[in-house]
Amino acid sequence: MLPDLLNELIKNRRSVFPDQFVAGKKVKDEIISQVLANATWAPNHGMCEPWHFTVFNGDGLQRLATFQSNLYKAAAGEAYNESKCLKLQQQPLKASHVIAIGMKRSAKKGIPEIEDIEAVSCAVQNIYLSVTAYGLGGYWTTGGITYFENAKAYFGLTADDRLLGFFYIGHVGIPSPAAKRQPLEEKVKWVTVV
Ligand SMILES: Cc1cc2nc3c(=O)[nH]c(=O)nc-3n(C[C@H](O)[C@H](O)[C@H](O)COP(=O)(O)O)c2cc1C
């Protein structure tokens, strides 16, 4: 039954972090392409399709690692933190693929920026669910250089666009524990007119 399958998929989707991936095991590029195709079926206001993805795999992962750790080093100044820098160098290499998530600001006037961001967020949920359906693991991170203005160009983004983070994908070695959500009643108010 499709609704049952969908309910299970949504509920069982979990963030799976790089240390939980099977080291060195690659995901087929065709699967990543399908995952990204699914991302582009997300709703978006004005059919602006504001998503822009940059996929890193193979040696590209090392390029991302070098780029982001160098950018961090250059910007950190006195706040430089060695373990943070090491993490930026090491994390991409634990993944099979890393997708930089960009929002390209729509040319259409009248669409507020937040709606382009919301559309990309819908696309990222499609990525999360697709990865889960393929039995893979992944997560969205907004850490590291995500909000560095001078990171944008590397990912094909201009000043008006936004870098919204990175989606890491790999084979699941250590599954994430079951998660919890607050009771629905705490989050939902029904207004019923009889
Ligand atoms: C916009 C956004 C940004 C996130 N950034 C991070 C992050 O920087 N680091 C991290 O460990 N997890 C990040 N996450 C993943 C959350 O930690 C994760 O979704 C949350 O713990 C709930 O777990 P679940 O995804 O398994 O339901 C992010 C999630 C979202 C939606």
Image (cartoon, helix red, strand yellow):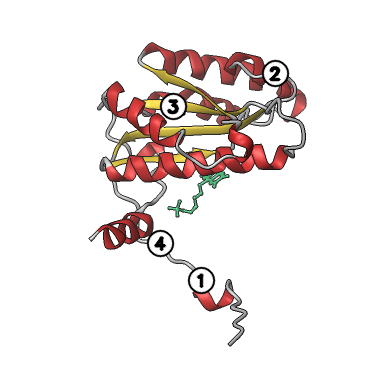
Tell us which disc is closer to us: 3 or 2: 2
The residue lying toward the viewer, choosing from 120 and 141, is 120
Q: CA distance from mark 4 to mark 3?
A: 24 Å
**Mark 4 touches mark 3? (CB < 8 Å):** no
Label 4 sits on a secondary structure element that is loop
Question: What residue does disc 1 label?
Answer: 182
Q: Is disc 2 surrounded by few (<14), some (14 to 19) or many (20+) residues within 10 Å?
A: some
User: Could one spot residue 20 in this view of the protein?
Assistant: no
Label 1 sits on a secondary structure element that is loop
184 relative position to 46: left or right? left
Q: Is residue 169 above or below residue 4?
A: above
The residue lying toward the viewer, choosing from 29 and 78, is 29
Quarter assignment of residue 120? top right
Q: Amino acid at mark 4?
A: Ala
User: Which comes sooner in the sequence, label 3 or label 2?
Assistant: 3
Could you tell me which residue is drawn at 65 percent across and 15 percent down?
A: 153
User: Could one spot residue 10 in this view of the protein?
Assistant: yes
Q: CA distance from mark 3 to mark 1?
A: 31 Å
Q: CA distance from mark 3 to mark 2?
A: 21 Å
Question: What residue does disc 3 label?
Answer: 98
Q: CA distance from mark 1 to mark 2?
A: 39 Å
Question: What residue does disc 2 label?
Answer: 158
Q: Position of residue 104 (x, y in %)?
A: 64, 26
Q: Is disc 3 surrounded by few (<14), some (14 to 19) or many (20+) residues within 10 Å?
A: many
Could you tell me which residue is drawn at 65 percent across and 22 percent down?
A: 72
Q: Which numbered circle lies on residue 179?
A: 4
Label 2 sits on a secondary structure element that is loop
Residue occupying the far bottom of the picture: 194
Q: Which numbered circle lies on residue 48?
A: none
